Amino acid sequence: MDNYKFTLLYVTFMKKRTIIKICIGLFSLLLISFVVLVMHINSVTKKNTTENINQRQLSRIDFKVHVDSTEANKIKNYVASLDGVDGTHFNIPEGIFTYSYKMNKQNSKVVFEKVMQLGNYDAHIFTISAADAQAMGGCPMKINDHSFSAYLTAYVTKFLN
């Protein structure tokens, strides 16, 4: 009987230890996640300085007629080779070409003109309407100003700046 009680006590002790280890692990994970979130908010909301003036811009060209995959790769590779262009993506079924570039090295109008010189395409630069720009503040990912994430972002920005 003593052996059974010892086994039962040992199992209970091991269960408590396991639960404590799991709780410590989860708390550590939450703490690390929160620290990473705060660091991310701080890096995103920095003021313009000489260190982060190399801002990137995302632009889009809409093709009105279908562009085949060979022509799409030609456009994509040509734009990717331009100075200041970082990334390119061509959505062939939708006829949408997006690219990112450094604002101090490249311009969306210059890239568009070079693409038009590359071939005779029926395309235009995508621009948002004035109403959409005012409603979203120019940002397609604008969050609700009264949401928890907006309050958290404002607090972290105020705290770190």
Image (cartoon, rainbow, N blue to C red):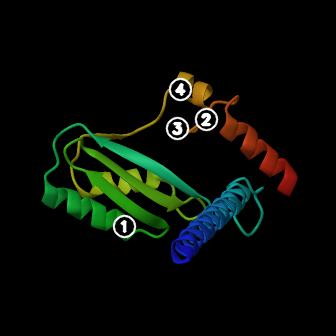
Label located before the other in sequence (3 or 4): 4
Residue neighbourhood size for the residue with mark 2, other residues' Cα within 10 Å, grouped as few (<14), some (14–19), many (≥20): few
Is residue 51 positioned above or below 109 on the image?
below
Kindly indicate whether the residue at mark 4 contacts the one at mark 2 (C-beta within 8 angstroms).
no
Q: Which residue is mark 3?
A: 140
Say which amino acid is labelled 4. Answer: Asp
SS of the residue under disc 3: loop
Label located before the other in sequence (2 or 4): 4
Image check: 145 left or right of 117? right
Where residue 109 sits: x, y (%)? 46, 49
Q: Quadrant of residue 23?
A: bottom right
Q: Which residue is mark 1?
A: 80
SS of the residue under disc 4: helix
Q: Which residue is mark 4?
A: 132
Kindly indicate whether the residue at mark 4 contacts the one at mark 1 (C-beta within 8 angstroms).
no
Say which of marks 3 and 2 sits in front: 2
Label located before the other in sequence (1 or 2): 1
Say which of marks 3 and 1 sits in front: 3
Residue at 78% x, 63% y: name it.
49
Label located before the other in sequence (3 or 1): 1
Say which of marks 1 and 2 sits in front: 2
Q: Looking at this view, is 118 or 133 the one in front?
A: 133
Say which amino acid is labelled 3. Answer: Pro
Q: Exactly how many numbered labels are in the figure?
A: 4
Residue at 67% x, 32% y: name it.
147
Is residue 48 positioned above or below 8 on the image?
above
Q: Which residue is mark 2?
A: 143
Cα separation, mark 1 vs mark 4, equals 29 Å
Say which amino acid is labelled 1. Answer: Ala
Where residue 71 sits: x, y (%)? 17, 58
Say which amino acid is labelled 2. Answer: Ile
